[in-house]
Amino acid sequence: NAGVMQNPRHLVRRRGQEARLRCSPMKGHSHVYWYRQLPEEGLKFMVYLQKENIIDESGMPKERFSAEFPKEGPSILRIQQVVRGDSAAYFCASSPSGSNEQFFGPGTRLTVL
Amino acid sequence: DAKTTQPTSMDCAEGRAANLPCNHSTISGNEYVYWYRQIHSQGPQYIIHGLKNNETNEMASLIITEDRKSSTLILPHATLRDTAVYYCIVRVLGTGGFKTIFGAGTRLFVKA
């Protein structure tokens, strides 16, 4: 059983461009979480999704950020019009239904030039 | 979720036991203590969790005080590869999912 997969592992964007980060949860997991980690800081919760539904987006910035977890395919974290402050590592975690044990992916490191 | 307090950093000699403390004085009766670690640039890795009894697995032991207001993660024979940031988290174990609130953690340095 493959672990949580994230791609790309590294993403470079210029200011104003869009960033799309993908997360494929572990097989059989229907819950996905996104976290952001700024340099030298701990992980900060962003959003929690189940298939086709956003359950908790209390950690998402109000503008430019959106997330989805469609019925088919990976979860997508989308950042529009990126700014330098968006540079961070973005981690995805998944868990099966009925458990809150979370398995983390390797992260996507976003650099905004 | 209850707040946790951990030392900012600790050192440990290779081969010795590493004892990482965590205070969670406001923990509720139904909240579990979880430990994760994050090795440089990698995703957090689950280590162990417990409610009130001491727990042991192949990675570590978890000692929870009788009043549950604090706990200690023990790595019995630390290696250089155990150098990482260790996060102590308390949360309710329930159905569905819950966001995990990570604090600053303890940066453990294992030295040869």
Image: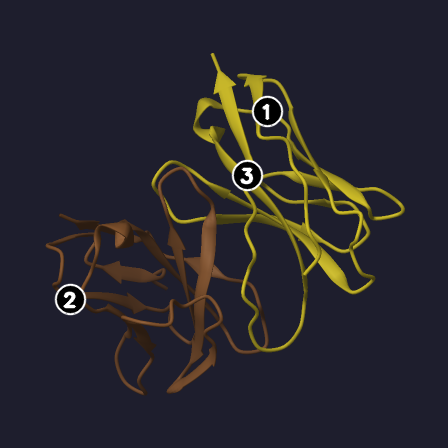
Chain colours: A brown, B yellow
Q: Left or right: where does residue B18 sit relative to residue A38?
A: right
Q: Residue at x 32, y 87 (%)?
A: A71
Count of marks, rendered view: 3
- Give the percent coordinates (x, y) of residue B34: 64, 51
Q: Left or right: where does residue B71 sit relative to residue A95?
A: right
Please give the residue where the numbered disc 2 appears in the rendered image: A18
Q: Are marks 1 and 3 on the same chain?
A: yes
- Give the percent coordinates (x, y) of residue B2: 71, 56
Q: Are marks 3 and 2 on the same chain?
A: no
Q: For the N terminus of chain A, which image quadrant?
A: bottom left
Amino acid, disc 1: His
- Give the percent coordinates (x, y) of residue A112: 17, 51
Q: Residues within 10 Å of mark 3 (few under 14, many from 20)?
A: many
SS state under label 2: loop
- Residue at the top extreme? B112
SS state under label 1: loop
- Name the mark nearer the viewer: 1 or 3: 3
What's the CA distance linking mark 1 and mark 3? 16 Å
Q: Which badge, 1 or 3, is on the more N-terminal residue?
A: 1
Check if mark 2's residue and mark 1's residue have beta carbons within 8 Å. no
Residue placed most toward the observer, B65 or A28: B65
Q: Residue at x 78, y 65 (%)?
A: B30
Please give the residue where the numbered disc 1 appears in the rendered image: B77
Amino acid, disc 2: Glu
